[in-house]
Amino acid sequence: MSAAAAMPAPPSGEQRGFGGPPPPPPWVPKTELGRRVHSGGIATMAEALATGLPLREAEIVDKLLPMLHDEVLDVNMVQRMTDSGRRFKFAVTVVVGNGDGYVGLGRAKGREVGPTIRRAIDRAKLTVIEVFRGCGSWECGCGRAHTVPFLARGRSGSVVVKFRPAPQGVGLAVGDVTKPILRFAGITDAWGYTDGHTKTTVNYAQAAFRALRGLSELKVTDADRARLKIVRGAIGRSILPPKEEGAPGGFRGGRRGPGGRGGPRRGGPQRGGPPRGGSTGARAPGARGPPTRR
Ligand SMILES: [Zn+2]
């Protein structure tokens, strides 16, 4: 019985201790941008990004975007052989966003899922971009910032993702992997088109993120801005539900968690189906052949 009492907690990695992780130590900024944000000299994410200073501290984003949500897009088990046998690592891809014009994508690898997710979240925070939104569709004209203002195109590896402006009410007619990326950015309507090996979730997500990033780097004329009702960054209203307390970076009730081993999304069926005239989503289920050549 004393042996049992002396047993160390099982190193399951997910839940250590009883009260969850200890509270983080107070933030001591290490970078110029961090110091300015910490002192209150910079009060919004728009100001922080406008400085052009490198964003290297996740705490900056924590302070300026307190309503940031995160979601695990992919948990993938990678293994390699060593002298002593197989070594497993998890590769985690995470999206963060406030549902109102700011979104980031991060990836990390590690032996334990929980800490790796937290690192991926911190990395995603450092990639946060200011998204352009508008009422870009001539079919709509509602004047609200609900879709991409122009065609957005991004590429990663073999995967090319395009988002096209859609009228209000269309919803996110895009592949399942990219849905949270758009939603976290605050976009509610878009048509998506993909090409390449979209079963590689990492590239798929990265291509979608790059599409939004490319959009945010465009120079927009005042005339376009007025005509397409383009807004940059936040409009002060998130499309995401209020964030539940006390669950930063963990799995949310297993909805998106790695239910089994390996990636939950890899090879999974993509719901939603292709929109009219598009090729969003998966090709034929289970198709593993090379992407069609164009
Ligand atoms: Zn509209």
Image (cartoon, rainbow, N blue to C red):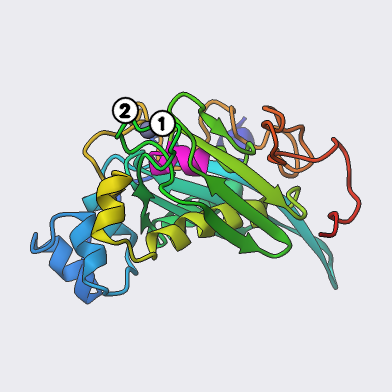
Give the side of residue 75 with respect to residue 34, left or right: right
Residue 113 x/y as whole percent: 60, 48
Give the side of residue 266 with respect to residue 208, left or right: right
Q: Residue at x 34, y 59 (%)?
A: 58
The C terminus appears in which quarter of the rendering?
bottom right
The residue labelled by disc 2 is: 242
Whether the residue carrying mark 1 lies under 8 Å from ligand 1 is answered with yes
The residue under label 1 is which amino acid type?
Answer: Cys
Mark 2 nearby-residue class (10 Å; few <14, some 14–19, many ≥20): few
The residue labelled by disc 1 is: 140
Q: Is residue 9 visible?
A: no
Q: Is residue 184 magenta?
A: yes
- The secondary structure type at the circle numbered 1 is loop
The residue lying toward the viewer, choosing from 156 and 190, is 190
Comparing labels 1 and 2, the label whose residue is closer to the camera: 1
Image quadrant assignment for residue 292? bottom right
Residue 266 x/y as whole percent: 75, 43
- The secondary structure type at the circle numbered 2 is loop
* Whether residue 29 is situated above or below residue 147 in the rendered picture: below
Q: Residue at x 43, y 28 (%)?
A: 168
